[in-house]
């Protein structure tokens, strides 16, 4: 704890700045506008989900969880012919407050871990450039690459992966700059 106490300001400030910038990126910039695709008949699909009693959760179709399921003719046929996919159903009413708070908490934990790593790598005073190098590298690692395996497994488009990597580089550099600016002297 004593190791991180002098870094409370860059921890909180970098988390807050990344949180604000990420909100702007997702709401105002165009590069995430095509991350999701409109259903051909959204109303009919919504009616189907309601009538089927599908509750909030993450679903996969066909249900190929387990070795036996993977061998069933129904699953083999579906995996060859389609459709194959996953469906996330969110609870209603959809509110953003909890998601925004949760996102900030994740950024706060990431900034705390970056502070720890940077403090271990640089235990004393250092130049802006050296602190930026360590903290931004850790930030890029945290913000860029953690989402790629999930995107590969669950069908994100290459454009979405690239957009998330660009965002991660931006967030990592912001984190590095905040830490470098407020590093204890």
Image: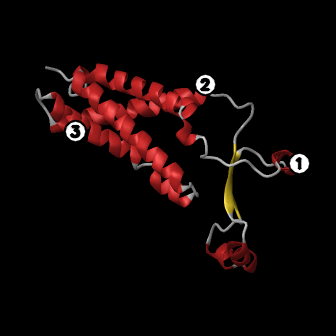
Tell me the residue at 61%/75% (across/down).
Answer: 67
Question: Which residue in the protein does label 2 denote?
Answer: 97
Which of disc 2 and disc 1 is earlier in sequence? 1
Q: Tell me the SS state at disc 3.
A: helix
CB atoms of marks 2 and 3 within 8 Å: no
| Left or right: 37 as drawn, with respect to 157 | right
Q: Is residue 75 left or right of residue 34?
A: right
Which SS class for mark 1?
Answer: helix
Task: Kindly check if marks 1 and 2 are in contact, taking CB atoms under 8 A apart as contact.
Answer: no
In the image, 49 versus 45, the foreground residue is 45
Nearest-to-viewer mark from 3 and 1: 3
Locate residue 83: give its quadrant: bottom right
Image color mode = secondary structure
User: Alpha carbon of mark 2 to alpha carbon of mark 3: how far?
Assistant: 33 Å
Above or below 121: residue 7: above
Q: Where's residue 112, x and y in %? A: 33, 31
- The tag earlier along the polypeptide, 3 or 1, is 1
Label ID, residue 142: none
Q: Is residue 56 left or right of residue 126?
A: right
Spatial CA distance of label 3 from label 1 is: 53 Å
Locate the N terminus by quadrant. Answer: top left
Q: Position of residue 111 (x, y in %)?
A: 34, 32
Can you identify the residue that label 3 sits on? Answer: 134
Q: Which mark is residue 51?
A: 1
Mark 3, Cα crowd under 10 Å, few <14 / some 14-19 / many 20+, is many
- Residue at (74% x, 30% y) in the render: 93
**Mark 1 to mark 2: distance in Å?**
28 Å
> x, y percentage for residue 13?
35, 21
The answer to which of marks 2 and 3 sits earlier in the sequence is 2
- Quick check: can you spot residue 59? no
């Amino acid at each position: 704890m004593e190791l991180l106490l002098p870094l409370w300001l860059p921890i909180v400030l970098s988390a807050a700045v990344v949180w604000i910038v990420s909100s702007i990126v997702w709401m105002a910039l165009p590069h995430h506008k095509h991350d999701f695709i409109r259903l051909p008949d959204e109303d009919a699909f919504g009616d189907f989900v309601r009538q089927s009693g599908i509750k909030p959760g993450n679903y996969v179709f066909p249900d190929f969880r387990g070795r036996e399921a993977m061998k069933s003719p129904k699953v083999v046929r579906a995996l060859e012919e389609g459709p194959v996919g996953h469906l996330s159903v969110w609870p209603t009413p959809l509110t953003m407050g909890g998601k925004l708070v949760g996102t900030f908490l994740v950024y706060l934990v990431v900034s705390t871990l970056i502070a720890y790593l940077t403090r271990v790598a640089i235990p004393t005073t250092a130049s802006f450039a050296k602190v930026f190098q360590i903290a931004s590298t850790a930030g890029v690692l945290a913000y860029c690459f953690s989402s790629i395996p999930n995107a590969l497994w669950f069908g994100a488009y290459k454009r979405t992966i690239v957009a998330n990597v660009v965002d991660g580089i931006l967030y990592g550099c912001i984190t590095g700059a905040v830490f470098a600016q407020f590093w204890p002297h």
